[in-house]
Image (cartoon, helix red, strand yellow):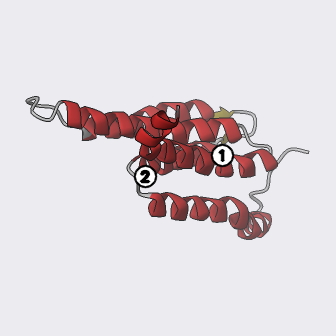
Amino acid sequence: MTQFFTQNSDIIIKLVVALLLGTIIGVERVIVHKEAGMKTHALVALGAAMFVLISDQMAVKYLNFPGFNPTMMASQIIVGIGFLGAGVIIFREKEERLIGLTTASGLWVAAGIGMASGMGFFDIAIIATVLVLLVFIFMNVFEKPIKRITHLDTDPK
């Protein structure tokens, strides 16, 4: 068992970092009662990291395979997460507004963080996670007064 962890330590670290960073973003989403929480963000980041690692392994295995481009799998993560994000976005006719856009974009960024982790770009993944949390947490401080002033806080009571 120890040999398994030793041989795969790089892969384990990349997947665990992606999982942890996605979970951290998800914690904030749970605290503010949003649609996608810890599990969703963690799985999106983990899945993106996994697909990047698979792409990396395929590049090694099929090095001389004509027409193979390992970046194609990574680019499809972005497309796939777009479908997941689109499913989160809802138009409420009664209120004439969209909801879920921030959640969808948070999932999109979580996929990017997972991709960075999967490639071993931990500095990018950690910095992006901190920036996402800054947006989620501190933008409310500025956004709520602006909405009040401009009368965009039309939440039905």
For this rendering, which residue is in front, 52 or 12? 12
Residue 79 location (% of width, % of height)? 39, 35
Q: Is residue 105 visible?
A: no
Q: Residue furthest front?
A: 2
The disc, 1 or 2, on the residue closer to the chain's N-terminal end is: 1
Q: Is residue 118 above or below residue 51?
A: below
Q: Which residue is mark 1?
A: 23
Image point (45%, 42%), residue name = 6
Amino acid on which disc 2 is placed: Ala
Crowd class of label 1 (few under 14; some 14 to 19; many from 20; radius 10 Å): many
Residue 114 location (% of width, % of height)? 49, 46
For this rendering, which residue is in front, 124 or 10? 10
Q: Is residue 75 left or right of residue 21?
A: left
Could you tell me which secondary element the residue under label 1 belongs to? helix
Could you tell me which secondary element the residue under label 2 belongs to? helix
User: Which quarter of the figure has residue 147?
Assistant: bottom right
Amino acid on which disc 1 is placed: Thr
Image point (29%, 35%), residue name = 57
Q: Which residue is mark 2?
A: 116
For this rendering, which residue is in front, 70 or 137? 70
Image point (47%, 58%), residue name = 122
For this rendering, which residue is in front, 140 or 11? 11
Q: Determine which of the numbered discs, if any, sits on residue 145 in the image.
A: none
**Mark 1 → mark 2, Cα distance in angstroms:** 15 Å
Residue 80 location (% of width, % of height)? 43, 32
Q: Is residue 33 visible?
A: yes
